Image (tube, coloured by chain):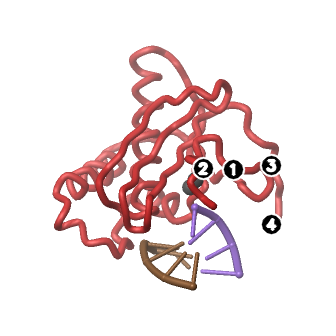
Chain colours: A red, B purple, C brown
Amino acid sequence: MNEIKEKPINGVAVDGYCKGNPGPGGYRGVDISTGEILFEWHTENCTNNLAEFIGIVHGLGFIKEQSKKFGKNYGIIYSDSEIAISWVKSKSSSGTKFNVDKYPLLKQRIFKCEMFLSESKSLPRYEKWDTKNWGEIPADFGNKK
RNA sequence: ACAU
DNA sequence: TCATGT
Ligand SMILES: [Mg+2]
Ligand SMILES: [Mg+2]
């Protein structure tokens, strides 16, 4: 199915980054309609896919919290990462090759992400950002050469 | 191959 | 050109 959707004008774009892979990295979330940076996180060492995964999960929690506390409904979370989206769907990042044992804070963060996913009765929508047709996701860090 |  | 992943 080669359906091409319209480029979204609402929702939250999340993107992960790594300076080296593995390397220092993190994620951020951007309000697509305004360009406002809504949340950001950095850590000393991780992989591209772990950063993308944790970013999506944080975005899901953020959207839920904004809705419940402030009645603000951000809509859909977008990610350009096939891998991270598959990990969110399965509620597990066990496919990672990265040994988190040297990074207990990261290990704990991943555990909490999976816990959040497994305990949630419902989650906000999350969809693939179609970079080919829409250009770079608005949350991108612009680190690629 | 596809997505990063 | 290398690494992370399905
Ligand atoms: Mg990305
Ligand atoms: Mg990017």
Marks 3/2: CA distance?
24 Å
Q: Which chain letter goes with mark 4? A: A
Q: Are marks 3 and 1 in contact (CB under 8 Å)?
A: no
Identity, as a three-letter code, of the amino acid under mark 1: Glu
**Residue A10 appears at what percent x and percent y?**
68, 31
Image-quarter location of ligand 1? bottom right
Of callouts 1 and 2, which one flags the residue occurring earlier in the amino acid sequence?
Answer: 1
The residue depicted at 73 percent of the width and 38 percent of the height is A8
Marks 1/4: CA distance?
22 Å
Identity, as a three-letter code, of the amino acid under mark 3: Lys
**Discs 3 and 2 share one subunit:** yes
Image side of residue A4 versus residue A142, left or right:
right
Q: Which chain letter goes with mark 3? A: A
Q: Quadrant of the N terminus of chain A?
A: bottom right
**Residue A39 appears at what percent x and percent y?**
44, 33
Name the residue beneath numbered marker 3: A5
Name the residue beneath numbered marker 4: A1
Q: Are marks 1 and 4 in contact (CB under 8 Å)?
A: no
Residue A121 sits above or below residue A39 on the image: below
The disc at residue A136 is: 1
Identify the element where label 1 is drawn. loop
Identify the element where label 3 is drawn. loop
The disc at residue A50 is: none
Q: Is label 1 within 8 A of ligand 2 (CB to nearest ligand atom)? A: yes
> How dense is the environment of label 3, judged by Cα within 10 Å: few (below 14), some, or many (20 and up)?
few
